[in-house]
Every structure is written in structure tokens, then in C-alpha cells.
Image: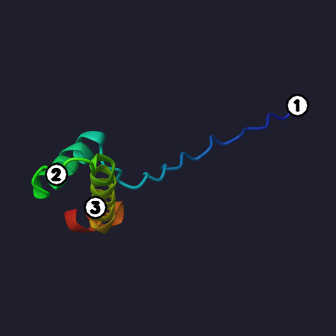
Amino acid sequence: MATTLHVAPRATKKRRTAKAVPTLEQIQVRAYEIYLERRGAPGNEVEDWLHAERELLVAASAKPRKSARTAKSEAA
């Protein structure tokens, strides 16, 4: 008699979410705010953009994240 080999389906792993990355629109708005803070002095568009991007990345990484375990314990 032939035996059949049963293979269990692979457990699906939750993908790790990437770090929160600011959107282009968020960077654009913050860069414009920096431009206005400089009173509109010309010639620093790239520097404003990079400064805005750095600020938003630091702010996004500083935000505390809720884990699934924390959310379940709060619901109980």
C-alpha cells in the first residue's frame, strides 16, 4: 500500500513594516515652511528639501509604535 505524504502549509509570516517614510508631499510642505522661515531668500531649495526630509525622518522614527501584543492587552 502506498502512503501519501502530507505537507503542512507554510505558516504565513507577517512582513515587517518598513520605517515610516515621509511622503513627497510632506517633504514639500515642510521645505516650503523652511523657505518661509528664511523669509523667502532664494538659492537654497535643495538644502531646504534635505533639511525637511531629515526632520520628518527623525520625527517619524521618534514616534512610539503600538505592537499587536499591546493592542490585545489593552482590549482585554
The reply to whether callout 1 and callout 3 are in contact (CB within 8 Å) is: no
- The residue most toward the top is 1
Residue annotated with mark 3: 55
Q: Position of residue 29 (x, y in %)?
A: 18, 45
Above/below status of 6 relative to 17: above
Q: Image quadrant of residue 75?
A: bottom left
Q: Residue at x 35, y 65 (%)?
A: 69
Q: Position of residue 12 (x, y in %)?
A: 54, 45
Q: Judge left or right: residue 59 versus residue 2.
A: left
Q: SS at mark 1?
A: loop
Q: Which mark is residue 2?
A: 1
Q: SS at mark 3?
A: helix
Q: Earlier in the sequence, mark 2 or mark 3?
A: 2
The reply to whether callout 2 and callout 1 are in contact (CB within 8 Å) is: no
How many residues crowd around disc 1 within 10 Å: few (fewer than 14), some, or many (20 or more)?
Answer: few
Q: Position of residue 25 (x, y in %)?
A: 24, 40
Residue annotated with mark 2: 41
